[in-house]
Image (cartoon, rainbow, N blue to C red):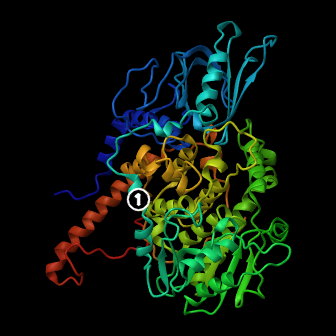
Amino acid sequence: MDRKPSLELLNKRLTSDEHCESRSLSDRSIAAVDSSSTASPSSTSTSAENVGVIAMPDKDGTLQNKADFDLLHGEKAQGPAADVTYLCPYTAAIRGSLSVTNYRLVFKSSEKDQVFTLEVPLGVISKVDKVGGIRSSGENSYGIEIICKDMRNLRFAHKQENHTRRQVFERITQYAFPLSNKLSLFAFDYRGLYKNDGWQVYDAVAELKRQGVPNDSWRLAKVNENYELCDTYPAVFAVPKTASDEDLRHVAAFRTRSRLPVLSWIHPDSQATITRSSQPTVGVSGRRSKDDEKYVQLIMDANAQSHKLYIMDARPQVNAVANKAKGGGYESEDAYQNAELVFCDIHNIHVMRESLRKLKEICFQYPIDDAHWYSNIEATHWLEHIKQILAGAVRIADKVEGNKTSVLVHCSDGWDRTAQLTALAMLMLDPHYRTILGFEALIEKEWLSFGHKFAQRVGHGEDKHSDADRSPVFLQFIDCVWQMTNQFPNAFEFNELLLVTILDHLYSCLYGTFLFNSEQQRVKEGVREKTMSLWSFVNSHKSDFTNPLYTECKRVLFPVASLRRLHLWIGYYLRWNPRMKPQEPTHLRNHQLLFLKEQLQRRLEELQKEMHPRGNRSTGPYASPKISNPVVI
């Protein structure tokens, strides 16, 4: 029997099916995919993979429609507007037809020598404007301009005599901002068929049990079952065992938004913990709470390895001091005995929003200013912010792992910078969160259940482009994760495509995963019952999101938080520029490597099975050695 890895056979299979593979990718995509008839099948696949397409779910049957493309369940389309010109910043103007459904915008070229399709989910749109008026002269001066949340702007030119602009503009405005027009988000209309139920990925009690809670020091509190104690916290969380429910109420009263310190993660050996909360309401008068001080002491005492507690305040110190004037502030080391306060110098949501705006101006332009590229990137301060977030998380992980000391993390409200720091520190400390299922659970736990305000920060379905509450907080977290995968390419089970897909569906409103601001709101709106989970799609197409070089790594990861080691994420911020696409189709290479890895693993098991009767020391016929490094091919 020929046991050699049949890579040649796989290559033939992939090559013969490459057109089908490319088509299936584009069928499942809801982002712009620039493909032309002059491009080879592999380059088409590359564009589908590497311009950051949003992976699309399998359809549950072709529906009757007025458009020349398949519709999703619940999607409705009107006849397309003809003779529309797409003004792409990277190519010449393209003529075609523009269709707008209640979910997406689809532009198809009408030129025979260039096949081009552009698909954009309406949830990605931040602002839509009419360009030009009746007196406008000049070619392509009359049309629609669309500002998107995913680092691009779109512009379509209409002919005035066709009278199509008004209808297209009104339909885009109606369905891009459904909540502003008293309509429901598309996620409540969509129903896909999946072999996995993504809503089962995370269960608060099961995740705490995985961490060994409840135990002698920590218990499960259900005082918030009806979200009466804190409406932005989950129904179940872990607190020090000796703290009564009445104690929790007193502590919550002293913390902003009633977000009292609760457990995020516990070290399996030292029992050092990461807890999270909001700022104390000390105010300018330096108000104190004996209940809060006692409670923080209980968190410290729960860790027998250390008699010290680090309080990591995510804010710059000047901002924390300024918050005293608003009734907030920070813990005094005099009031909280054996506690050390550390400021992480991460700026607020307004600074981050402005930084991303500058980055978008640089990335989505053509031609790119090569002569001033690095100075322009530096002027955005984006990588500096990424560095500060990563550095703060590394300090937390180091205190827990190296010093065996517990850490309390908070910012102002405890749902933005706090989530960034706790989630990243947990990713460094716990290898479970570096798997696909573990990473999904981490997002569900630290971001969704603990009340990151996704609806406000992203602006789902609302026509409020200038809303001061919008900010790329979650995008920065995913960027930091990508930086970690860059420094530790073998330590993560998931690949870059998963990170891009998560960000794309953060905006798309196809799934209910990121909708609303809190667990309480999602329960009230019946999100689990009425929408599909993004994880249903991801886990039903797991091989597409699997890193072929992954090797389970139990050790703690300490990424280098230095500008010398951080890079601009080209695969996300510059993915719309065709010149930035890799020449080799990434998804095909990943599948080849996964195929080889599976064959080599099977061969290893066969050899171990043959060796076992001869006195092999393995405990069973299929026992595999722990591999510290991936197979080099």
- Compared with residue 476, is residue 253 higher up or lower down, i.e. above or below? below
In which quadrant of the rendered view does residue 530 lie? top left
Quadrant including the N terminus = bottom left
List x then y, in percent, for residue 443.
Answer: 52, 60
- Compared with residue 504, is residue 333 higher up or lower down, i.e. above or below? below
List x then y, in percent, for residue 169.
Answer: 65, 22
Q: Residue at x 71, y 43 (%)?
A: 363
Residue furthest left in the image: 613
Q: Residue at x 54, y 31 (%)?
A: 104
Residue type indicated by callout 1: Val
Q: Is residue 207 left or right of residue 139?
A: left
Q: Is residue 210 left or right of residue 617?
A: right
List x then y, in percent, for residue 440.
Answer: 47, 59
Tag 1 residue: 201
Look at the image and tell me whether residue 403 can be seen.
no
Look at the image and tell me whether residue 316 can be seen.
yes
Secondary structure of the residue carrying numbered label 1: loop
- Compared with residue 436, is residue 24 higher up or lower down, i.e. above or below? above
In which quadrant of the rendered view does residue 17 lie? top left
How packed mark 1 is, by other alpha carbons closer than 10 Å (few <14, some 14-19, many 20 or more), is: some
Q: Residue at x 45, y 39 (%)?
A: 56
Most foreground residue, 320 or 154: 320
